Image: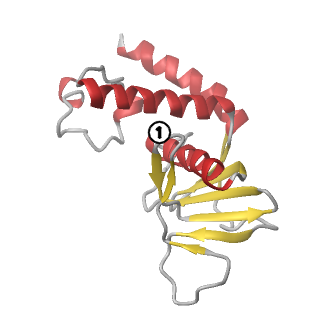
Amino acid sequence: MWYFIIIFIFFICLLIRPRAIKKCKLKKIAPLGYSLFYTDQNTNNRKNGVIYKKILYSEKYNIQGKPDFIYKKLNTCYVIELKSGTIKDEPMPHTGDLMQLIAYFLIIEDLYGYRVKKGKIIYSDYCFVVKNTRYLRKYLLNTLKDMRYMLKTGKGTANCSFVHCKHCMCKQTVCTFYDNL
């Protein structure tokens, strides 16, 4: 049964990746023609017009976060999220990292009114350029809805699979999925 789920998720990943997510070797962080708008990094050389270490909160979506970098050009933004781990041969970023980046897209659009076209998740060995697609936004909003329902009612079912759970922070703690393999 579980191998059907893995095959299904693999095919979904193949459908999403060419359109929305592209794996690349790390070249440079800042996109060409964009200027720094926000950073969560500590620095002594502060520039005028740059927002430093502020928690960004969206009332519309009731989510908050602190992206590592936001670059701006006219009315568009480009979000950069740095990760300390590696991705190795994985064809996609970790699901949680992807949802985090998409959440930043929504927060920026709600808070500042800037359209976010793309973002980048940078691991120590590879990076992923992620387009802000309707599918990814809908996936995040459905995930948030499910999470809020589970928090409110205490009811819900986890979507356990090897692909979803291999990088989960609950692995071998409160979740018994890996114990049953």
**Residue holding disc 1:** 95
Q: Which residue: 41% across, 31% down?
A: 163
Task: Measuring from the top left, give residue 14's x and y in whole percent.
Answer: 63, 27
Disc 1 secondary structure class: helix
Q: Is residue 8 above or below residue 13?
A: above
State whether residue 80 is above or below residue 94: below
Q: Is 179 on the left-hand or right-hand side of 54?
A: left
User: Number of marks in the image?
Assistant: 1
The correct choice, above or below, for 170 with respect to 160 in the image is below
- Color style of the picture: secondary structure
Q: Amino acid at mark 1?
A: Thr
Indicate the quadrant where residue 144 lies.
top left
**In this orientation, which residue lies closer to the viewer: 23 or 120?**
120
Q: Residue at x 35, y 34 (%)?
A: 165
- Say which of 42 and 175 sits in front: 42
In the displayed image of the protein, which residue is found farthest to the front? 59
- Image coords of residue 72 (percent x, y): 73, 64
Quarter of the figure with residue 92: top right
Task: Kindly indicate the quadrant of the structure image that contains residue 158.
Answer: top left
Residue located at (67% from left, 31% from top): 134
Label 1 Cα crowd, 10 Å radius (few <14 / some 14-19 / many 20+): few
- Left or right: where does residue 150 sit relative to residue 67? left
Q: Is residue 30 above or below residue 25?
A: below
